[in-house]
Amino acid sequence: MPEEPSLPTRGLRFWNLRKVVYKEARVNIHDLNRAAWDKEVEEGENPYTKVVSSEQIAAAKAGRWALYLSDCKPVPANWFPPLEHAKVLCLASGGGQQAPIFAALGADVTLLDASPNQLAQDRYVAQRDGLTIQTLEGDMADLSILQSDYFDLIFNPVSTIFVPELKPIWHECYRVLKAQGTLMTGFMNPDEFIFDVEALDHQKALVVKHPLPYIEHETLSPEQIETYRLEKRMFHFSHTMEAQLGGLLEAGFIITGFYEDRRPKEDENPIRHYMPSYYVVKAQKN
């Protein structure tokens, strides 16, 4: 396996994975969702844990590639800056899918994810296909290990539904990007969370149940939370459009691109017939 490049860091003494960013519950949610994603990798059924093939890597090197921030629509090719030698941060993007494609395209890739098992998927692809990917285990809301004004591109697939607050994430992204650098991020349509998940899963019925914004652990009893912990289930947060788009603007970004996406047919979720499930944003640092 190629040697991992040196970290684009401000010094390891600033790094503390368990640093409390907002409140004590923040760390607990981070740890619980990290364990849940590790379990998903072990079980091998979640599509976001399945690595790209050697054929896909070879195709990317030959100029045939696509990258996704949502389920169905690829990110438009004209959104990307020149990628050869570009400094790319794949944020909360483990699973052996996006980072290896960027590396195959000649980018200088740093990958940060909360899940050790998801990061291991990327290291596996790197070793298999002779790629160089720097992997970091950490919290997307705390990028203090990374230099300011360093990256040309941050690529962030749908992941903000697993964290309780967005403001620190957008401010950290703004800090580590170079001037005129680009953030591409996908997020869930907050309106999805108004529906009863059990009715959707078992009856394919749209039953309105939850007020928004949805904070999953606040809808659960202590006994249910303990069940989630023991079964290593994920905790979700809907957030609001104000927190998503308004938060980007407040951090200093200019929004330069936007599109919607729906769930795939294979999902069998009836929501896809009525509204998009994903929004994808391109934002630029001034």
Image (cartoon, grey):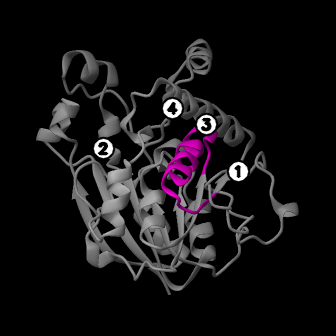
> Considering only vertical position in the picture, is 2 above or below 10?
above
Labels 1 and 3 touching (C-beta < 8 A): no
Residue at mark 2: 191
Element under disc 1? loop
Labels 4 and 2 touching (C-beta < 8 A): no
Q: Which region shows up in magenta?
A: 113-134
Residue at mark 3: 34
Labels 4 and 1 touching (C-beta < 8 A): no
Element under disc 4? helix
Lateral position of residue 67 relative to residue 142, left or right:
left
Number of numbered tags placed on the structure image? 4
Callout 3 amino acid: Arg
Q: Earlier in the sequence, mark 4 or mark 3?
A: 3
Callout 2 amino acid: Asp
Callout 1 amino acid: Tyr
Answer yes or no: is residue 164 visible. Answer: no
Packing grade of label 2 (10 A; few <14, some 14-19, many >=20) is some
Labels 1 and 2 touching (C-beta < 8 A): no
Number of the front mark, 1 or 3: 3
Q: Earlier in the sequence, mark 4 or mark 1?
A: 1
Packing grade of label 1 (10 A; few <14, some 14-19, many >=20) is few
Number of the front mark, 4 or 1: 4
Q: CA distance from mark 4 to mark 2?
A: 28 Å
